[in-house]
Image (tube, rainbow, N blue to C red):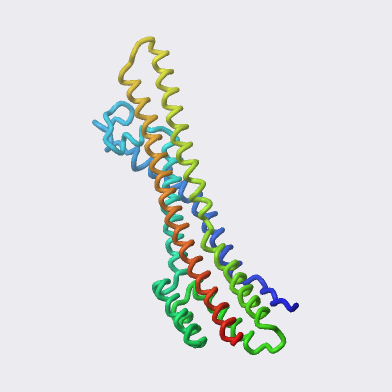
């Protein structure tokens, strides 16, 4: 039984993967540095404290965050990473979807296939562009190749088309999922870092109580405030990470479904037309 030839790994996809890896490598340290600068020079500015006294002055909202302690810039860097990687994923997935609505594109290709207009379906792929269109166009090219091949049975040709679509999908989909693991990781470490800051704040509070020998409401409230600031930042970071991760996985699932639906139509159209 003849098998469809295996496609070599596309150098374009290797370059895309390398670019995405380089983006992540640069983004993480830059976010950390930016968070530290914001914490030190913006949140820690004396204008956020009464009488300009950073140590003892009553802080405003930004000064309160600054009082959260040394873990604040760490958690802030996580928040910046979520924002930057979310923007990057929006751009990449948007390009993968193509220039038009994916559902409308699938309907146009399906209609062209039902009418037996393979060239028209290819033209729709050229108009749409993006990962979905690339996969479908690859399947349509294989469709034409199988029509011209007299040595294979209809079932073998249908299998070859299906395999070509699966291979093209395997090349396109990993690019869409890159950096999602970073966003997923930030869900956990954001919460854990916030809890760690809470623990540090409570340790400091009880330490000051023990040192004073009596209830020092000012010191106690400051330490509890430090604990709560870290908790709030950590939970906010994790919540945003969860939302963005679910948004992107939903978008990728929709693209995958569109590819599967159209790929099935291509195979079924080929089998139906040639079995007749």
Q: Is residue 58 left or right of residue 256?
A: left
Whether 108 is drawn above or below 198: the answer is: below
Please report the residue visible at 34 percent of the width from the left and 29 percent of the height from the top: 225
Q: Nearer the viewer, residue 50 or 167?
A: 167
Q: Nearer the viewer, residue 118 or 24?
A: 118
Residue 138 in which image quadrant = bottom right
Q: Position of residue 161 (x, y in %)?
A: 62, 77
Whether 155 is drawn above or below 229: the answer is: below
Picture mark count = 0
Q: Position of residue 67 (x, y in %)?
A: 36, 32
Please report the residue visible at 68 percent of the width from the left and 79 percent of the height from the top: 156
Residue found at the far right of this picture: 1
Residue found at the far left of this picture: 51
Q: Is residue 92 left or right of residue 220?
A: right
Residue 10 in which image quadrant = bottom right
Q: Position of residue 218 (x, y in %)?
A: 31, 20
Q: Position of residue 210 (x, y in %)?
A: 42, 13
Q: Is residue 177 left or right of residue 11?
A: left
Please report the residue visible at 67 percent of the width from the left and 88 percent of the height from the top: 149
Whether 128 is drawn above or below 55: the answer is: below
Q: Nearer the viewer, residue 96 or 69?
A: 96
Please report the residue visible at 28 percent of the width from the left and 37 percent of the height from the top: 61
Q: Which quadrant is the N terminus positioned in?
A: bottom right
Q: Which quadrant is the C terminus positioned in?
A: bottom right
Residue found at the far front of this picture: 276
């Amino acid at each position: 039984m003849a098998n469809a030839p295996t496609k070599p790994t596309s150098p374009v996809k290797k370059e895309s993967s390398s670019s995405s890896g380089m983006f992540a490598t640069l983004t993480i340290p830059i976010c950390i540095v930016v968070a530290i600068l914001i914490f030190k020079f913006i949140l820690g500015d004396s204008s956020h404290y009464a009488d300009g006294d950073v140590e003892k002055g009553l802080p405003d909202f930004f000064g309160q965050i600054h009082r959260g302690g040394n873990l604040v810039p760490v958690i802030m860097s996580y928040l910046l990473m979520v924002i930057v990687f979310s923007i990057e994923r929006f751009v990449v997935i948007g390009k993968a979807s193509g220039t038009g609505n994916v559902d409308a594109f699938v309907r146009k290709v399906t209609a062209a296939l039902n009418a037996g207009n393979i060239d028209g379906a290819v033209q729709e792929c050229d108009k749409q562009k993006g990962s979905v269109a690339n996969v479908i166009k690859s399947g349509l090219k294989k469709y034409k190749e199988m029509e011209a091949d007299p040595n294979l049975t209809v079932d073998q040709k249908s299998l070859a088309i299906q395999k070509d679509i699966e291979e093209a999908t395997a090349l396109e989909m990993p690019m869409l999922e890159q950096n999602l693991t970073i966003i997923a990781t930030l869900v956990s470490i954001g919460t854990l870092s916030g809890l760690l800051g809470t623990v540090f704040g409570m340790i400091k509070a009880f330490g000051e109580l023990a040192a004073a020998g009596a209830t020092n409401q000012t010191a106690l409230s400051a330490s509890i405030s430090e604990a709560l600031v870290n908790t709030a930042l950590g939970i906010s970071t994790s919540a945003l990470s969860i939302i963005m991760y679910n948004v992107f996985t939903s978008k990728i699932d929709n693209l995958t479904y569109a590819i599967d639906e159209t790929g099935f139509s291509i195979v079924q159209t080929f089998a139906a037309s040639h079995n007749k």
